[in-house]
């Protein structure tokens, strides 16, 4: 007895120690890892808080200056230069670098000069922010003027185009359309990362791009965006825009603000914004479906802040029928406060705006606005335009180049505009409130770019310049974007055979293009007459396999070809070379009216077919692919789009010619009526590809999808339960996931009668829906999307007392649903013991009560045996052992724990339930009895 008491005391003492230790640990150890924001950990203010504090310290002149983004001429930053005054005296918010303004003057060291120029500009701003005794004696100023970093912006669209300011020294940037032709947004993110990394190394912190215009109806003309757009599908343009912006942010460590352009979209415009204010006949609802969709994707609908644009470039475009009235035409959106407010009232834009999104006006010095405000060309009031643009809702006013001469707006006009803004700030409180609101947005963004407004945090290291120009993502893009337009891939092999050999004569006809770094710099050939020839010789010439010699190739420019067509007798050597050639290779760029020779190919096909007979004519579109019509395409052997004239694209062209290009992965990202290629059809579900459908849950990966030979676990439902249905990824005609918003209908068939569930739309290429089971019938379910159809799923509805047939578990993809049986009793059909689930019993309390009675009877018998033999204490122990064992067995069956289905494969019948709890109680008594015998001496 003493030993038992000692044991109990020791047990209780140990238990108390454990409880005490648990309490101590609970107090000393935090409930989980706590991650505080960086600003919280060191008590630093948020960007918005810092901006609000800074705003209070700014004078009206400093506040107004933050609104302006200007261009300037040359590289002189001395105290006598105009740009010095802009920064130090008028406190402008930022500057745009432009090679047309001679901001880069040494073609051999553009990155170094650009870096040095930016260092000087930011240093001027820093030095001018210091308060000295000579500048003020106002003792009331408690906080000295602060250094606010300048925005230093640039347009860098790539493809060596006129919209690329830094042509040399950086890694090649492929055109946006070439990225779109890959249908792989991860490549856009890689290019964005490269752009962000290299521009931020130079000190640039504002990128005008990417272009989010949707080319829904591409065609040559005044509004031709060429390869400057990701494509013609709003969804994919938005996806590529998100990826590109995310890449820029990550590559720059969030030190570059991205300005997406041209809001609200120029894809339907018949004029370029630099030339004339275009009028588009579209309602707001139509804009939301197409033009605005990509801008939604990078504002309020962006998946995260990294994928969201920091600002939008507000373009000079007006709309007819904007609010439904076809006879009503807005002013340019950049100057129309009513139209602008309607756009900002749209949920995604309003949400983004509430989170600090900034609107930047397009160039207020453009030829388009000059024609609008001053058709006579006599007097263009830039102040009046700037006021209109600011009142319309623009936060930053871009005073760029004058369109007619492509030179910066005269300094005096900019200064007058700023001074008049300051005066209006002092006289008009509503205007002052507007200025403060915009400046607060600007300061918040600058605080997001830099953790502190210290010059050391803004200036970049010169050592970073050593790694510039080492990117090669353009090579991957060139390979992945190459698109075979005509003929079909099955015919191309025979066209390219036999390959060009040493006995073949080849004529290369190339459009050419050049660019200048500065007004006094020599022209740089971005595509020369011999560029493609050089690529061929480098890869297949005497030092690379000896498949071709330079003497076999004759290269001519489109200018030469135009001369031949205009003056047939002027180029006898060229005519002879064309007659003797086995191959004619053509490298085309865009057709532009200001480059008449760019039409040379179409003229050749129409005017001199005698020069093309019995030739293999291969055309590479190094620009946009839509300049040849159906008749022209029928006259050439092969038509291939490369979308770029970078060296990497010329290498791809050479490899295609010599049949060393493994496969054409690219697909047209825009419609091309000449070959009956419609983008809407191409991005719709492919009826030749049956897509999967799942019930219950979708596999984590396609490789885990149910196969005919697998044995899936049957799904079990009750009447009234919800059944979830999912499709796998639905593929379009190009083998890509269909765009978000593609309609899908799930169809349930019962005894030959089909019922369509409410239509749903896709997200990430797949769709899902759910419904409740309300009938005890076998079901067949499939889904349709456009002309495409899914697999079918058969669902067997079994009654309460039916046994799940073995075949149901071996047929895929079949889910078995067990429901309570209808009114007709299955006992009449099947006299054998009926399957039973405790959780599905119609009288669970009856089953529990009867089981408890059995357990108590056995427990009482055990106690009486002990009491009658004179060992009452052990009788109590036997009673408890029987009670606990019986209840434990009942709960084990109730919870359907592991092993129940194995022990009772046919289900748990009432008889089996009662036998199990009886046996468990007796087994508990037996164990207690054996324990008693072990303790006896």
Image: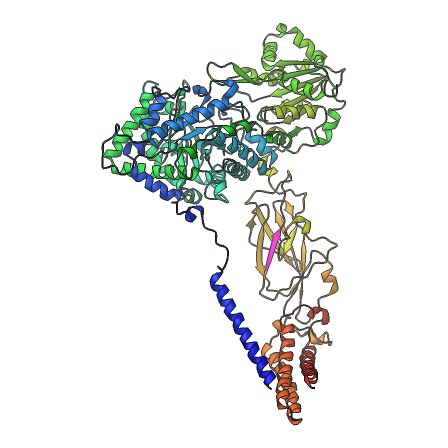
Q: In this rendering, does residue 304 appear at all?
A: yes
Is residue 668 positioned above or below 73 on the image?
below
Front one among 924 and 12: 12
Is residue 902 positioned above or below 290 on the image?
below
Front one among 206 and 438: 206
Does the stretch in magenta take in 428? no
Left or right: 456, with 863 as reference point: left
The overriding secondary structure of the stretch rendered in magenta is strand
Q: In this rendering, does residue 905 appear at all?
A: no
User: For the N terminus, which image quadrant?
Assistant: bottom right
Instruction: Name the residue rendered at 42%, 33% in the picture.
Output: 456
Left or right: 500, with 353 as reference point: right
Is residue 720 positioned above or below 100 on the image?
below
Image: magenta residue range: 723-728
Q: Position of residue 690 (x, y in %)?
A: 67, 47
Q: Position of residue 912 (x, y in %)?
A: 70, 77
**Circle count:** 0
Q: Quadrant of residue 453?
A: top left
Q: Quadrant of residue 608?
A: top right
Q: Position of residue 137 (x, y in %)?
A: 23, 31
Left or right: 419, with 485 as reference point: left
Left or right: 344, with 873 as reference point: left
Q: Quadrant of residue 52?
A: top left
Instruction: Name the residue rendered at 33%, 39% in the picture.
Output: 54
Does the stretch in magenta take in 725? yes
Front one among 118 and 247: 118
Q: Position of residue 348 (x, y in %)?
A: 44, 44
User: For the C terminus, which image quadrant?
Assistant: bottom right
Q: How is the image coloured?
A: rainbow
């Amino acid at each position: 007895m003493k030993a038992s008491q000692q044991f109990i005391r020791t047990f209780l003492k140990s238990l108390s120690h454990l409880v005490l230790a648990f309490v101590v640990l609970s107090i000393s150890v935090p409930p989980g890892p706590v991650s505080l924001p960086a600003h919280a950990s060191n008590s630093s203010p948020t960007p918005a808080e810092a901006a609000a504090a800074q705003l209070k310290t700014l004078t009206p002149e400093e506040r107004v200056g933050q609104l302006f983004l200007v261009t300037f001429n040359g590289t002189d930053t001395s105290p006598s230069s105009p740009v010095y005054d802009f920064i130090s005296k008028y406190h402008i918010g930022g500057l745009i670098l432009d090679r047309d303004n001679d901001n880069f003057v040494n073609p051999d060291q553009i990155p170094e000069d650009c870096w040095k120029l930016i260092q000087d500009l930011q240093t001027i701003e820093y030095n001018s922010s210091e308060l000295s005794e000579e500048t003020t004696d106002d003792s009331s100023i408690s906080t000295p003027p602060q250094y606010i970093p300048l925005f230093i912006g640039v347009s860098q669209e790539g493809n060596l185009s006129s919209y690329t300011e830094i042509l040399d020294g950086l890694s090649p940037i492929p055109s946006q359309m070439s990225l779109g032709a890959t249908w792989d947004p991860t490549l856009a993110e890689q290019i964005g990362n490269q752009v962000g990394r290299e521009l931020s190394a130079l000190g640039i912190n504002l990128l005008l791009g990417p272009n989010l215009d949707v080319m829904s109806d591409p065609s040559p003309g005044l509004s031709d965006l060429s390869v400057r757009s990701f494509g013609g599908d709003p969804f994919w343009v938005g996806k590529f825009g998100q990826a590109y912006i995310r890449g820029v942010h990550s590559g720059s460590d969030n030190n570059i603000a991205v300005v997406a352009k041209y809001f609200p979209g120029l894809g339907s415009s018949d004029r370029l914004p630099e030339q004339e204010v275009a009028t588009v006949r579209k309602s707001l609802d139509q804009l939301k479906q197409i033009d605005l969709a990509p801008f939604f994707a990078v504002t309020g609908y962006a998946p995260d802040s990294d994928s969201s644009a920091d600002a939008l470039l507000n373009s000079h475009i007006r709309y007819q029928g904007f609010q439904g009235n076809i006879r009503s035409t807005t002013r340019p959106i950049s100057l129309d406060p009513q139209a602008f407010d309607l756009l900002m009232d749209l949920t995604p834009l309003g949400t983004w705006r509430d989170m600090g999104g900034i609107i930047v006006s397009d160039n207020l010095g453009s030829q388009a606005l000059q024609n609008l405000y001053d058709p006579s060309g006599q007097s263009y009031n830039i102040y009046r335009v700037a006021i209109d643009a600011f009142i319309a809702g623009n936060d930053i006013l871009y005073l760029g180049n004058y369109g007619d001469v492509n030179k910066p707006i005269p300094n005096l006009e900019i200064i007058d505009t700023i001074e008049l803004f300051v005066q209006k700030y002092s006289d008009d409180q509503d205007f002052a409130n507007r200025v403060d609101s915009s400046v607060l947005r600007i300061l918040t963004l600058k605080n997001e770019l830099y953790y502190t407004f210290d010059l050391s945090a803004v200036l970049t290291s010169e050592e970073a310049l050593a790694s510039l120009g080492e990117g090669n993502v353009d090579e991957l893009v060139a390979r992945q974007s190459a698109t075979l337009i005509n003929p079909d891939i099955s015919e191309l092999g025979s066209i390219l055979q036999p390959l060009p050999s040493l006995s073949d004569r080849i004529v290369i006809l190339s459009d050419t293009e050049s660019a200048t770094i500065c007004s006094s710099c020599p022209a740089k050939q971005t595509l020369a007459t011999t560029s493609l020839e050089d690529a061929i010789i480098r890869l297949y010439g005497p030092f690379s396999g000896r498949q071709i010699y330079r003497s076999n190739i004759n290269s001519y420019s489109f200018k030469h070809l135009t001369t031949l067509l205009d003056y047939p007798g002027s180029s006898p050597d060229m005519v002879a070379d064309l007659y003797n050639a086995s191959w004619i290779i053509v490298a085309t760029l865009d057709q532009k009216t200001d480059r008449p020779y760019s039409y040379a190919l179409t003229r050749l096909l129409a005017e001199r077919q005698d020069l093309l007979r019995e030739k293999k004519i291969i055309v590479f579109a190094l620009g946009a692919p839509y300049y040849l019509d159906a008749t022209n395409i029928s006259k050439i052997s092969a038509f291939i789009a490369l979308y770029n004239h970078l060296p990497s694209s010329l290498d791809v062209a050479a490899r295609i010619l010599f049949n060393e290009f493994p496969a054409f992965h690219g697909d047209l990202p825009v419609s091309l009526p000449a070959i009956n290629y419609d983008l809407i059809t191409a991005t719709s579900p492919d009826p030749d590809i049956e897509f999967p459908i799942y019930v219950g849950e979708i596999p984590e990966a396609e490789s885990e999808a149910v196969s005919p030979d697998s044995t899936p676990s049957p799904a079990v439902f009750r009447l009234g339960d919800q059944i979830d249905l999912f499709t796998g990824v639905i593929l379009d005609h190009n083998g890509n996931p269909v765009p978000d918003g593609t309609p899908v209908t799930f169809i349930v068939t019962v005894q030959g009668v089909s019922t369509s569930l409410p239509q749903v739309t896709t997200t990430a290429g797949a769709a899902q829906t759910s419904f409740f089971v309300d009938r005890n019938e076998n079901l067949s379910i499939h889904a349709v999307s456009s002309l495409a159809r899914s697999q079918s799923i058969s669902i067997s509805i079994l009654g309460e007392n039916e046994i799940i047939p073995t075949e149901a578990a071996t047929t895929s993809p079949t889910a078995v649903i067990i429901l309570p049986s209808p009114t007709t009793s299955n006992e009449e059909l099947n006299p054998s013991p009926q399957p039973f689930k405790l959780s599905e019993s119609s009288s669970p309390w009856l089953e529990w009560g009867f089981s408890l009675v059995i357990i108590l009877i056995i427990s009482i018998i055990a106690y009486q045996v002990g009491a009658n033999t004179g060992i009452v204490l052990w009788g109590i122990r036997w009673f408890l052992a029987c009670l606990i064992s019986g209840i434990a067995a009942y709960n084990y069956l109730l919870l359907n724990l592991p092993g129940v289905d194995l022990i009772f494969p046919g289900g748990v019948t009432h008889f089996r339930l009662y036998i199990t709890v009886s046996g468990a109680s007796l087994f508990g008594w037996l164990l207690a009895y054996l324990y008693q015998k072990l303790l006896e001496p």
